[in-house]
Image: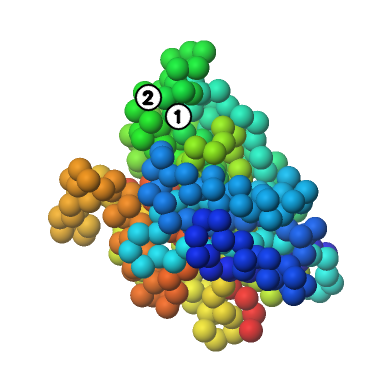
Amino acid sequence: MPRARIHRIPTTGPDDTSGLRALIDAGDLDLGKLVAIIGKTEGNGCVNDFTRGFAVSALTQELGENATMVSMVMSGGTEGGLSPHIVTFEVLDDNGPGPAMAIGTGLSDDIDPHELGTFAQIECVAETVSAAIKLAGLSGPADVHFVQVKCPLLTADRIAAARDPVATTDTLRSMGLSRGASALGVALALGEIDRSTAKATRIGSDLDIWSGRASTSSGIELMGHEIVILGMSHNWTGPLRVDHAVMNDAIDTASVAQALDRLDVGKQNKLRAVFAKAEASTNGAIRGQRHTMLNDSDISSTRHARAFVGGALAGLTGDCDLYVSGGAEHQGPDGGGPAALIAERI
């Protein structure tokens, strides 16, 4: 039976692969079994954040010929006390009882620039997610707790080269449209919305339509979609468990605490990794109190939100090496976002 194994590795910079190399040399990480790496880099998380591509390039060089078999998702932005790190995912062979955490990966075909932020992108992601669910051996969408999507964005060159009109000529806005379309693709694949709703939704505007298990991050380094799925399956064995929560707003740590309780963290299990989305609420308030994240002309609201939610979750979990991704269009309710937690039996 397959067994998932993860390592959370701190990094000193986007090109730091020393921690990964140490695990390989010690025999604690099998390159032939590595299927995915998800990480946070200390860039600005915006269009010109080249730390994501820098990190992927460094990891690709370190992995050598094995790199083509590994899905790599890098999210820029470690504002506040968030600590840069990577999480590796391996699929080993073992015997034992289930259920346990399962891993699935997928890589879509590239989309054309004019398809970004449209139903074509939604459909592309939905098809890739559905294929990854089958690849993971999950019985269906109900077993899925987390879907991480790395999606593309538009640059001036891509806009100029587009065969048809693009959804926006604002490169920063293209990041949100791509994240939103990708999240709706996850929602469609998981049965959270139907096809007619997906087609009718105004991407980036109809924020009452969302996925409770999608985490999407856009980057300049690709035009397709890298997808990593985590779920629980009786077809997998091992000590890892995964659960998810939906934060209703940026300070809703209670929902995450409930997921920690379901995973029995601190008693039978140890918390191994946290993945969360962060977003400044569009109404400019959190529980009736005004925030100024949307009014800062110097710093993108996504950067404020990452730092804010990162601090809230760090206080709850006692960890700063958390994957908190800004920009939660159609990922949880407005101002909130999904969170996924991995625990390991002690």
Towards the viewer: 266 or 84: 84
User: Badge 1: few (under 14), some or many (20 or more) residues near its Cα, within 10 Å?
Assistant: many
**Residue 123 placement (x, y as % from top left):** 57, 30
- Quarter that holds the C terminus: bottom right
x 78%, y 48%: residue: 65
Q: Is residue 150 above or below residue 267?
A: above
Q: Disc 1 or 2, which lies upstream in sequence?
A: 1
x 80%, y 58%: residue: 32
Q: Is residue 226 above or below residue 268?
A: above
Tell me, yes or no, whether the two marked residues, 1 and 2, touch with CB atoms within 8 Å. yes
**Residue 23 placement (x, y as % from top left):** 69, 71
x 64%, y 35%: residue: 108
Give the SS element for disc 1: loop
- Could you tell me how far apart the alpha carbons at marks 1 and 2 are, in whole angstroms? 8 Å
Determine which residue is flagged by label 1. 154
Residue 68 visible in the shown view? yes
Nearer to us: label 1 or label 2: 1
Q: Indicate which disc residue 127 carries.
A: none
Mark 2 belongs to which amino acid? Thr
Determine which residue is flagged by label 2. 168
Towards the viewer: 40 or 241: 40
x 54%, y 75%: residue: 271
Q: Is residue 274 above or below residue 40?
A: below
Mark 1 belongs to which amino acid? Leu
